[in-house]
Image (tube, rainbow, N blue to C red):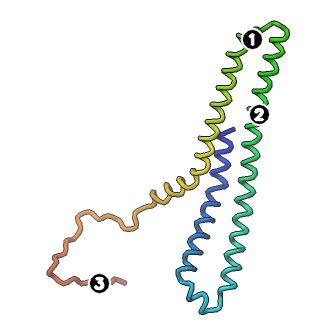
Amino acid sequence: WSLYLYNRVMAVCLPLDKCWSFLTRYQSERWKHIFRVVTNAKAKQEIDDINAYYEETIKLDLGFWIWFIWQIFFRSTTNILFLLGVIILGAAEVIKTRLTIGSFFPILNYTFKLIDGLSRISDIEHQINYWAPSVMKLQQALTRPQPLPTVENPIRLERSAPCRVVFDQ
């Protein structure tokens, strides 16, 4: 189940992360050159454009995370129902005297440890799912090719000599 949720996070959140980055850059650029926007009487249009893009992006973002939270809630409810089932089954076996209370406590303890381990794994998974799109985006940015190729045996220019640039057509 965790792998399915992780794949969904990567498939949905990477494009959403790009949308949020675009919106942040766009707003930053507009604030940097706000005098141009105001001088050209485009303030109302810019505010409407930014609000429309924000509403479009937040609708997709919130829709996905609400779905994700419901999936986590379903998984947690399943864990609690499993624990409750072990408690009820163990209590029934104790009442029927097939199981002693002393042998029921280790079973109950192991079940609590199992549920606790699953909840800790769930917390770690939540952190991974939260940060994975940003990490993937950073990884893509760092693996871009170099803008200028490295030339073998480059021509060394002397500092005191003039430099001539020729453009071939």
Residue 78 - label: 2
Q: Earlier in the sequence, mark 1 or mark 3?
A: 1
Q: Residue at x 65, y 88 (%)?
A: 42
| Mark 3 Cα-neighbour bin, 10 Å: few <14, some 14–19, many ≥20 | few
Which amino acid type is shown beneath numbered disc 2?
Answer: Thr
Residue 64 in the image, given as x and y percentages of width and height: 72, 54
Q: Residue at x 73, y 37 (%)?
A: 76
The extreme top residue here reads: 97
Q: Nearer the viewer, residue 17 or 166?
A: 17
Residue 166 - label: 3
Q: Secondary structure at mark 1?
A: helix
Residue occupied by mark 1: 101
Single out the mark in the foreground, 2 or 3.
2
Q: Residue at x 70, y 16 (%)?
A: 105
| Mark 1 Cα-neighbour bin, 10 Å: few <14, some 14–19, many ≥20 | some
Q: Secondary structure at mark 2?
A: helix
Q: CA distance from mark 2 to mark 3?
A: 73 Å
| Left or right placement of residue 139 versus residue 70 in this view | left
Q: Which quadrant does the N terminus fall into?
A: top right
- Check whether the beta carbons of the residues at disc 1 and disc 3 lie within 8 A of each other: no
- Check whether the beta carbons of the residues at disc 2 and disc 3 lie within 8 A of each other: no
Q: Earlier in the sequence, mark 1 or mark 2?
A: 2
| Mark 2 Cα-neighbour bin, 10 Å: few <14, some 14–19, many ≥20 | few
Query: In the picture shown, does residue 75 fall above or below 16?
Result: above
The extreme front residue here reads: 101
